[in-house]
Amino acid sequence: MRTPDLTSESGLRPLSAIVVIAFVVFVVMLRVTYLALGESVGTRKLAVLRETGMKPAYSIEDRRGTPLAVFLERLDLVMSPQSMWQAHTPDYMAVELANQLGPDVHPSELLALMLPDAKDGVIRVDRWEIDAAAAERIDRWIRGEHEWERDAVGSLPGIGFELSPGGDPQLLWKPVELLSRETRKTFGQTTSPQLWTRKIADSLGSALFGPLDETATDADRKNRRREIWSGLMPTQFCRAALSISPERSLPLSTLLRREGVEPVQMSLASTRAREYPSGDFPVLGQWGFTQDGQLEAEPYGGLESLCDDILSDGAWSWLEPIPGSYDYRRERPARLKLRPYYLGRAEGTGAPAVRVTMDVSLQRFLRRRLERVMVENEPAVAMAIAVDLASGEVLAADGIHTYGMAAFAPVKHQFMPGSTFKLVTMATALDAGVVQPSDTFQVDNGEWVLWVDGKSRVIHEAEGSKHGLITAEEGLAYSVNAALVQIGLKIPAELFSDRLKSLGYGQRVDANLGGEESGLVPQLPWSRRFAHASVCYGYEISTTLWQHMQALTTILRGGVYKPLRIADSVVHDGQRYPLEKSEPIRVFESETCRTVRGMMELGAREGTGRDLYRDDIVMGTKTGTAERVKTEVCLHVFGRAAAALREAGKPVPNSLYRQLRGVREEHSRCHTSSIVAVGKLPGDDREVAVFVVVDEPRVGGHFGSKVAGPAAMDILVEALGITRGGTETKRDLLPGFAASIVDPGPRMSDEAREQPWKARAGW
């Protein structure tokens, strides 16, 4: 009988196959033992590697813990234009990348981002001063006539000269044209873009600085090329695309590998995106790139800067968050492409949160109310702030500028306070004992004449002002300029000036929100007829909303000065750590301030705030209306001129303000309308103060009570809980609870209430 053929499919006899299998098993066992023990085998060693995640960063939350600012991880397409375009073709890569980034990305727009040094596709080279001889050599090279360009076939496209403003030759070039495939093909460089860019660098370097001699090394040539490309393409880092979705990251990575793009040239980088889930309010500030070549975004302005400063203090170093990580083991050398083995992970620690005093619901309402003011009154600037009176905590603050303002308007924009400043004048006079509420003053009938050393000045009043003989109390309640001038002139100028300094006027407020201005207080000695008299009713002095509110709340809370607070505490791992508070400083006697509060209540009931009065609130008001004098510049005039210059790409010169002095809009006077309102619910101790400034309204009048008043009252009743989102609520439940008067919809039937599983509909 014939022995059957037992040859295996591999071609080996069974015995041979068994030997091979045994050998393979031995090798596998040896490898497993090697990996398990972590010992060296031959010349290969095991390495434990650690992959670390991004460092956690702080968040910001409102007084109730609602997130205002958080970090989310994102992918950005980052690149070095200087390195990338020495080895790749700009227009070709723009098309390929745009195809992977999605239909919303146009190649031309992407190309502009990837060529940040170019304007309209042209880069103006200003690294070198090119004299006439060098310009001639470069021009000959461009035209293909230079001795080191023997293989030239014509003039180089996309590069040339232009005279600079100073009359010197300036080199210009178009990267897309000079580095294109068509140009390379024309000049016989069909293989590598890098060979072409090296040729450009070598030739241009020779024209600029002279050819390298025969003793030049490779390092010399590399340094020459580096110098040339530093001039041709200065930017070393930029972000070509932000927030790339996960589904597009893999195709992009595949494209970069296929095109041989090195990580130093272009890569997908994991970074953090700052998100504002409750609303992107100006008071928050922002994260961004403030200078060229910056690798990480940083906070600037607003609460972002403030919170970063707080946590940068060494006192909080123990809260430094630790990023998560995982460990894995990989054999070396890497060229063997051996598999990594996961070993374990380490959880990171969470980042702290800075809790601020703001109420996000009130902040949203205040923002909407200012937007309505912008529509109804068309001002240049509208600002508002709401403050818990006892603590000085800012509940909400915002500002809108028609012509744009990078900084937060309530700490940046300066204005003339007008009649709201009369509260300071009255409190100072009462505290100094130079006036009593019942003292009387003759204010005439709209025009009162001040005489000083035989010289006169007419003090004008608003239309409908109280006239004749009035009391000091009526002078404040009805906002009579002549009365406050007579009262304020009783205060020694030195005492008045010192009191203003103690309230923070003329000094930069320590809000740390970025861009704070100090305002202006006239320097002593004061002219009695002008500076002293004008300050008494809020003229010849400038302030910011934040600064003025700090002073006004000092009076309203009983004479104790407290800086406005917006950062409350640091929260970490479920624990809250209050931030240190400034020591309160007594500026006025409490009895003085009670008297002023009484005058404000009279002003709300009968005086300039009577149209705003509500009998369901214990409230007081002080309105303000100021008109810019002819030597001052109107905001609308200046804003339009500055915006036109910025739009044209030109700087705004310091001389612009002087040039526009006295210019007015046709048939327009430039007013600042403002009001401070304070109130509480009957039987409740919690008081809220609101201050609104509407600078240069163009429609709807100009009086503080008519323009700023309605917005201030809406914000006040919202802050007190009388309304929610502007809708009136019922207040007939338990204290602290309110039922909305909004229709709740269909009611649940008795049957559905007792057996809800039987009734899913028909409520």
Image (cartoon, rainbow, N blue to C red):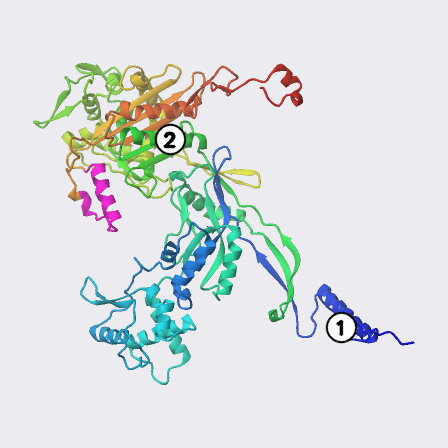
**Mark 1 is on which residue type?**
Ser
Res 313 seen here: no
319 is higher (above) or lower (below) than 375 = below
Q: Nearer the viewer, residue 433 or 529?
A: 529
| Residue at x-position 38% and y-position 68% | 181
Q: Is residue 10 visible?
A: yes
Up-down relation of residue 751 to residue 7 (above or below): above
Q: Nearer the viewer, residue 550 or 634?
A: 634
Q: Does 463 sit left or right of 185 as displayed?
A: left
Q: Given the current orientation, which residue lies at the most extreme front position? A: 1
Secondary structure under the numbered disc 1 in the rendered image: loop
In x, y percent, where is residue 150? 31, 81
Q: Which is nearer the N-term, disc 1 or disc 2?
A: 1
270 or 411: nearer the viewer:
270
Q: Which residue is mark 2?
A: 368
> Which residue position is annotated with label 1?
10
Region in magenta: 633-657
The one of 145 and 558 positioned closer to us in this rendering: 145
Q: State whether the magenta stretch is mostly helix, strand or loop.
A: helix
Looking at this view, name the residue that lies furthest to the bottom. 214
Depicted 279 relative to depicted 93: above or below: above
Element class at badge 2: helix
Q: Residue at x 52, y 57 (%)?
A: 251
